[in-house]
Image: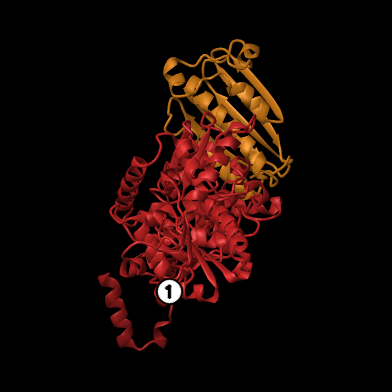
């Protein structure tokens, strides 16, 4: 590893695979626990990553979750090569969703994914190109609020 | 109380065969076999009793109190939980069980079920007034689950309902009431819980959620049950004080009972430590935010499935169900009206004055220093890649991942892995053979050398 002050993690997320949904977030959570990041921060990271992971599974037909953990912050990158989001502003509104009915019946697709990711993270960036995919970057500072 | 933790679980070295059944069964990876004997990692154990349940050599026991200890007290009170009644068929009347307890030396009986009814209403009220915080709320009644949350899910502490476990509430109330009624001093009164599990006992000795316990000790159901069977007969005399619960408090003994008594519809009854673990993991990821309340019991079936019970848990479940339906024949149709009939204790303790905040007990991190932990993590991953990934347990750790962690922490060695050891031996053997070939011929007796040469050629 070139930079000795960070630890990296990579997960491939398969599209439409609800059985394995949450594996990347759970794996990242365990890693963060080993490193000793405060529990409330871990939870925000795990929730944010889980929402992103679900989006990749539901909408994009698969993608990649990468995380880099530094002593003072964690950065999570979620990339997919799916259809992309035509209007990001619209997609950021709570309740807006393009999830198909069968997915909503499973309790997903309530249109809270992107807003929740933004709420959980300290820094949120989304880039999307129709036809080529979406890239999300979330930063989480390791400053514990309370417990 | 080594390492600052009291555990009810005891590993008996003399009985231990060094198999890794318990190591594999432990939900918090708290056991290792070292030098052929199972050892407990105190900081990780949650006293759930899974190891005790699985050990085939009776090498794991739960430390509980002995009946003789009641002799130190002038006045003894038994706190029987619903799971005690579930050991007996429904034809055995409650009064006969009470008489059994009375003949064993208990002066008074107070059903934990009565306290469960008060606590049920507190839970319902807390849920009703809970606004804005994360859901679901999580039950506080199983001490093993509370400890699991402390060590593995500290982020969920805020979701645990801050109410007293019924056993503790019962003890606080009854001790105080007996002192006032009889004029006896606190130290003259013994309050004894009849326990279905080791975790309740551990929580009495070292409570994670109650400020000052009023329970003097716990006797296991498995011990008391046999004694009651031998001694019982007839029914308890009317002058002996018994405070009995209704069918709703009694329903707490089996899974789903807490939800029923508290009148919670949008709730889950999760039981069995592995299922509890999975559900807590999902709650942590916010997957279950639409659920109001989760009742969690470490034992499959609920408290009736406790490792210190006597009867098979399915039989016990049936016994309890039938007992409840008989009780309901004589109770009002309405839940609250039924509970009101047994909730006649004046000044029953309110949880808020007695509950203390759960403290996180994280044990996952590799080092207190984050940079050091990161270094150890990378080293651990490297070691893990070199291990076979079979999770065979022969090294004494439950998985290759755990062995890698133990190695990085300096608590184990790479050649504890038998596959690593095998390849080391092979490498060494090859090395020896190479060396043997280089031994000058002149220095060896001819005969032996010929023998070596022959065996070499034949292999």
Secondary element at image label 1: helix
Towards the viewer: B345 or A85: B345
Q: Give the side of residue A40 with respect to residue A25, left or right.
A: right
Chain holding disc 1: B
The residue furthest front is B239
Which residue sits at x=49%, y=68%?
Answer: B39
Q: Mark 1 points at which residue?
A: B432
Q: Which chain is orange?
A: A
Point 43% across, 72% down: residue: B36
Task: Give the total of numbered labels.
Answer: 1
Quarter of the image where one finds residue A46? top right
**Residue A120 spot, x, y in % from top left:** 66, 30
Q: Residues within 10 Å of mark 1 (few under 14, many from 20)?
A: few
On the image, the x and y values in percent for residue B163 come to: 59, 46
Answer left or right for A115 relative to B118. right
Q: Quadrant of the N terminus of chain B?
A: bottom right
Q: In which quadrant will I find the C terminus of chain B?
A: bottom left
In front: B117, or A138? B117
Is B254 placed left or right of B453 in the picture?
A: right
Q: Compare residues B147 and B190 and report the one nearer the observer.
A: B190
Q: Can residue B404 be spotted in the picture?
A: yes
* Residue B417 placement: quadrant: bottom left
Quick check: can you spot residue B426? no
B300 w.r.t. B73: above or below: above
Q: In which quarter of the image is residue B37?
A: bottom left
In the image, residue A54 above or below residue B180: above
Describe the colour scheme in one phrase. Answer: by chain
Residue at x-position 46% and y-position 19%:
A104
Q: Chain B is drawn in which colour?
A: red
**Residue B69: x %, y % from top left:** 50, 74
Residue with the most extreme left position: B458
């Amino acid at each position: 590893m070139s930079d000795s002050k960070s630890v990296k993690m990579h997960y491939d997320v398969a599209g439409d695979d609800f059985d394995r949904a949450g594996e990347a977030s759970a794996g990242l959570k365990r890693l963060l626990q080993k490193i000793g990041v405060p529990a409330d921060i871990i939870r925000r990271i795990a929730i944010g990553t889980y929402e992103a992971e679900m989006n990749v599974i539901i909408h994009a037909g698969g993608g990649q979750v990468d995380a880099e953990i530094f002593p003072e912050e964690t950065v999570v990158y979620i990339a997919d090569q799916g259809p992309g989001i035509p209007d990001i502003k619209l997609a950021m509104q709570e309740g807006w969703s393009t999830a198909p009915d069968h997915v909503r019946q499973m309790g997903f697709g309530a249109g809270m994914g992107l807003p929740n990711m933004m709420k959980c993270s300290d820094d949120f960036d989304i880039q999307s190109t129709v036809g080529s995919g979406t890239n999300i970057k979330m930063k989480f500072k390791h400053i514990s609020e309370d417990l | 109380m080594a390492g600052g933790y009291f555990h009810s679980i005891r590993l008996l070295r003399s009985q231990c065969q060094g198999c890794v059944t318990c190591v594999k069964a432990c939900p918090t990876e708290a056991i290792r076999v070292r030098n052929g004997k199972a050892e407990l990692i105190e900081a990780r154990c949650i006293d759930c009793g899974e190891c005790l349940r699985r050990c085939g050599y009776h090498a794991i026991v739960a430390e509980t109190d002995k009946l003789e200890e009641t002799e130190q007290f002038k006045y003894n009170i038994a706190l029987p939980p619903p799971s005690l009644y579930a050991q007996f068929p429904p034809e055995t009347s409650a009064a006969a069980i009470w008489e059994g307890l009375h003949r064993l030396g208990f002066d008074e009986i107070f059903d934990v079920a009565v306290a469960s009814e008060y606590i049920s209403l507190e839970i319902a009220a807390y849920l009703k007034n809970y606004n804005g915080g994360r859901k679901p709320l999580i039950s506080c009644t199983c001490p093993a689950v509370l400890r699991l949350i402390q060590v593995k899910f500290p982020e969920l502490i805020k979701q645990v309902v801050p109410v007293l476990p019924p056993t503790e509430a019962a003890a606080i109330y009854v001790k105080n009431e007996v002192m006032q009624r009889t004029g006896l001093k606190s130290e003259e009164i013994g309050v004894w819980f009849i326990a279905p599990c080791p975790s309740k006992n551990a929580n009495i000795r070292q409570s994670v959620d109650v400020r000052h316990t009023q329970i003097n000790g716990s006797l296991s159901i498995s011990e008391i049950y046999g004694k009651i069977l031998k001694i019982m007969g007839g029914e308890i005399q009317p002058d002996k004080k018994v405070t009995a619960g209704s069918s709703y408090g009694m329903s707490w003994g089996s899974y789903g009972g807490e939800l029923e008594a508290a009148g919670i519809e949008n709730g889950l009854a999760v039981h069995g430590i592995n299922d509890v673990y999975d559900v807590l993991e999902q709650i942590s990821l916010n997957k279950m935010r639409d659920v109001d309340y989760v009742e969690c019991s470490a034992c499959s079936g609920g408290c009736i499935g406790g490792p210190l019970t006597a009867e098979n848990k399915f039989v016990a479940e049936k016994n309890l169900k039938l007992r409840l339906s008989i009780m309901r024949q004589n109770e009002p149709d309405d839940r609250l009206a039924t509970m009101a009939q047994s909730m006649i204790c004046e000044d029953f303790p309110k949880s808020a004055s007695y509950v203390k905040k759960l403290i996180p007990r994280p044990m996952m991190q590799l080092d207190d220093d984050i940079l050091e932990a990161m270094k150890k993590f990378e080293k651990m991953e490297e070691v893990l890649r070199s291990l076979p990934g079979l999770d065979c347990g022969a090294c004494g750790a439950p998985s290759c991942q755990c062995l890698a962690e133990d190695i990085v922490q300096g608590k184990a060695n790479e050649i504890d892995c038998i596959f690593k050891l095998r390849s080391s031996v092979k490498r060494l053997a090859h090395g020896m053979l190479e060396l043997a070939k280089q031994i000058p011929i002149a220095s060896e007796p001819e005969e032996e050398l010929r023998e070596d040469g022959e065996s070499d050629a034949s292999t």
